[in-house]
Image (cartoon, helix red, strand yellow):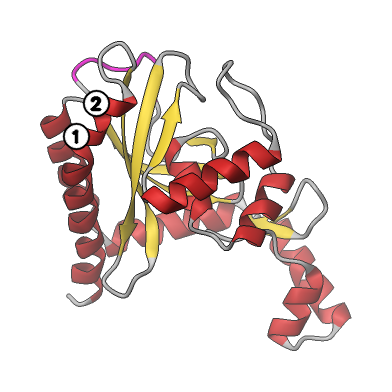
Amino acid sequence: TNSAPTSMSDIIRVTGMTKPTAHRIVNLLIDIGFLERDGAGMGFIEGANLVDLAHKTLAAAAPRSLRHSILQGLSDETGETSNYGVLSGGEVIYLDRVEAKWPLGLRFDAGSRVPAHCTAIGKLLLSRLPEDEASALLRSMPKSRYTENTRTDLDALMKGLRQIRETGIGTDDQEFMHGVVCQAVPVITEDGKCIGGIAISAPEARMTLDEARAFVPQMKAAAANLASTFFIASNS
């Protein structure tokens, strides 16, 4: 789910199918919700039903109770809301979330979708793509302005992704919700595959992004623990 839209020519090249066969199968996958046409006409992205199937597979591979307990531990350590999400097209899908004792006021349950261009997990995962793929994906996705801090200019967004790539930490400085800051780190398996991001969110009045940096070690530990659950599940 961490890639730019796939073109019909790419599908034909990779699969070796004839053009009529590829068109027929792609249209079938669109009909059953496994593929969607990219809004910018650049190709195809994962459909809602395929994403839902992937989530169910992830849930089976990494027991939700174990994943949830790791997020609960992070929330207890930081005192803030924690969540785990993956990139799907131009959005982040929350696979799990633990609300702080003082909720943010806007609730996002597991399965909720948020925009990638202005959220900590979204920008973090975009930054891990090859630059041309990240740029293509940003061009194709809707880039609504949610607050006065939301960046919608492609050059500004790409500059921000380069900074995140250097630090390995995604940030959202009141870019999605006014008064709320967020910080994210990647979840990386032993074989080096990024399978999402872990983030903490808090009211800016209670925790600034500078103050959030103090929790990076705890977040990285939680991310490593979460990644290990997928390894455990696949070898059990």
Q: For marks 2 and 1, give the CA distance.
A: 6 Å
In the image shown, does 29 or 180 lie closer to the viewer?
180
- In this view, the residue in front, 224 or 171, is 171
Q: Quadrant of residue 94?
A: top left
The answer to whether marks 2 and 1 mark residues whose Cβ atoms lie closer than 8 Å is yes
47 vs 229, left or right, is right
Other-residue count near label 1 (Cα within 10 Å), few / some / many at <14 / 14–19 / ≥20: few
The numbered mark at residue 211 is 2
Q: Is 187 on the left or on the right of 108, as rendered?
A: left
Q: Is residue 6 above or below residue 208?
A: below
Give the residue type at disc 2.
Answer: Glu
Q: Indicate the quadrant containing the C terminus: top left, top right, bottom left or bottom right.
A: bottom left
Label for residue 214?
Answer: 1
Q: Is residue 9 above or below residue 160?
A: below
Residue drawn 37% across and 48% down? Answer: 167
Q: Quadrant of residue 82?
A: top left
Whether residue 189 sits left or right of residue 218 in the image: it is right
Residue 46 is labelled as: none
Q: Report the span colored magenta.
A: 101-107
Which structural element holds mark 1?
helix
Residue drawn at x 77%, y 80% is 12
Q: Is residue 34 visible?
A: no
